[in-house]
Image (tube, rainbow, N blue to C red):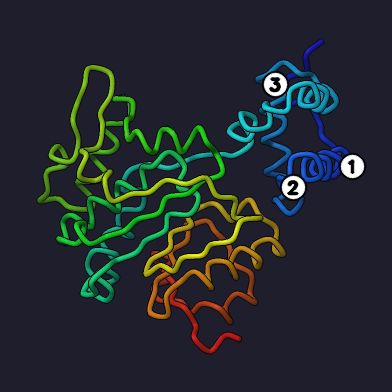
């Protein structure tokens, strides 16, 4: 009998065996992901696919190696929305962009961009600051499914009202309609917001980053990592951040105490940091 999600229990031993096997066989490292979050994702995946147990999941993946790519989309929680935490976007518009926007080129990395709402929110902010034309934006995620939707920039009309309300909080005098084209069932961001963005699949846990950026976003991604993995990823961000750059994390991301050697707090309310040049 199929177990309900609430009844299925995954032991630490099962989880460790699974993550080790996935790392060895597929080269994907989940060994330092926060265990409770990963277990919830696996329970959700097993229930949705009617696999009954961890053994059933692993047996199916062994039969079809391509399944790991689609299963990643189930394991990773891609929660984002337009103008989420509107005060952050006001701070970026009135403070951050004033400090870095004068330069000839503005480089931005959205790490863990999910389905793209954050990317296009930033694009709107840049356009309203007359900086979009000189911006070079990299958007990355581990999920190919999320990246595909982000690149398309098309969203269900169900979320339109929330998008419009959040934008109005950010800019009460603005007109959100001019940034989107509306269809019967969906709305799509205008081409001008898309053409400055490059999309790439990137694994924060394993992949390097050979570019440097004035602004790096990584919001509500690291909350799924344990302390060791957080420090590893933070070092990646530190190396990729320009000396005068800004690092922006999610409201629920908790940084290890030792990371204070890498970054100094710029604004506690909006979780914006600066690079600490004294870090060795």
Tell me the residue at 29%/58% (across/down): 89
Q: Nearer the viewer, residue 55 or 172?
A: 55
Label 2, residues with CA under 10 Å away: few <14, some 14-19, many ≥20: some
Which disc is residue 35 wearing? 2
Is residue 23 rendered to the left or right of residue 45?
Answer: right
The x and y percentages for residue 51 are 76, 18
Cα separation between marks 1 and 2: 11 Å
Q: Is residue 226 above or below residue 182?
A: below
Describe the element under mark 3 as helix, strand or loop. helix
Residue positioned most to the front:
210
Q: Find out whether the residues at labels 1 and 2 contact each other: C-beta distance under 8 Å.
A: no
Q: Is residue 4 above or below residue 70?
A: above
Q: Is residue 7 above or below residue 125?
A: above
Label 1, residues with CA under 10 Å away: few <14, some 14-19, many ≥20: few
Describe the element under mark 2 as helix, strand or loop. helix
The x and y percentages for residue 68 are 68, 31
Cα separation between marks 3 and 1: 20 Å
The x and y percentages for residue 1 are 82, 10
Tell me the residue at 43%/38% (across/down): 115
Q: Which residue is mark 3?
A: 47
Q: Find out whether the residues at labels 3 and 1 contact each other: C-beta distance under 8 Å.
A: no
Tell me the residue at 30%/46% (across/down): 120
Cα separation between marks 2 and 3: 18 Å
């Amino acid at each position: 009998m199929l177990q309900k999600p609430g009844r299925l229990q995954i032991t630490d031993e099962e989880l460790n065996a699974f993550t080790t096997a996935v790392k060895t066989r597929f080269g994907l490292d989940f060994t330092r992901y926060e265990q409770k979050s990963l277990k919830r994702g696996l329970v959700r995946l097993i229930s949705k696919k009617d696999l009954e147990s961890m053994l059933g999941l692993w047996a199916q993946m062994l039969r079809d190696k391509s399944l790991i790519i689609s299963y990643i989309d189930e394991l990773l929680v891609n929660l984002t929305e337009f103008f989420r935490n509107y005060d952050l976007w006001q701070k970026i518009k009135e403070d951050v962009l004033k400090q870095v926007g004068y330069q000839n080129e503005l480089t931005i990395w959205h790490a863990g961009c999910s389905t793209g709402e954050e990317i296009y929110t930033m694009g709107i902010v840049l356009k309203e600051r007359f900086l979009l034309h000189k911006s070079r934006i990299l958007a990355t995620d581990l999920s190919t499914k999320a990246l595909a939707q982000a690149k398309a920039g098309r969203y269900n009309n169900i979320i339109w009202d929330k998008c419009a309300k959040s934008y109005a909080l950010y800019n009460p005098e603005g007109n959100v309609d001019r940034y989107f084209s509306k269809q019967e069932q969906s709305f799509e961001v205008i081409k001008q917001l898309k053409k400055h963005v490059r999309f790439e699949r990137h694994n924060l846990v394993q992949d390097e980053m050979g570019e440097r950026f004035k602004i790096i976003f990584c919001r509500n991604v690291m909350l799924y990592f344990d302390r060791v993995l957080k420090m590893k990823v933070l070092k990646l961000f530190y190396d990729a951040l320009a000396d005068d750059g800004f690092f922006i994390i999610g409201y629920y991301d908790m940084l290890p105490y030792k990371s204070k050697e890498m970054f100094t707090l710029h604004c506690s309310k909006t979780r914006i940091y600066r690079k600490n040049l004294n870090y060795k």
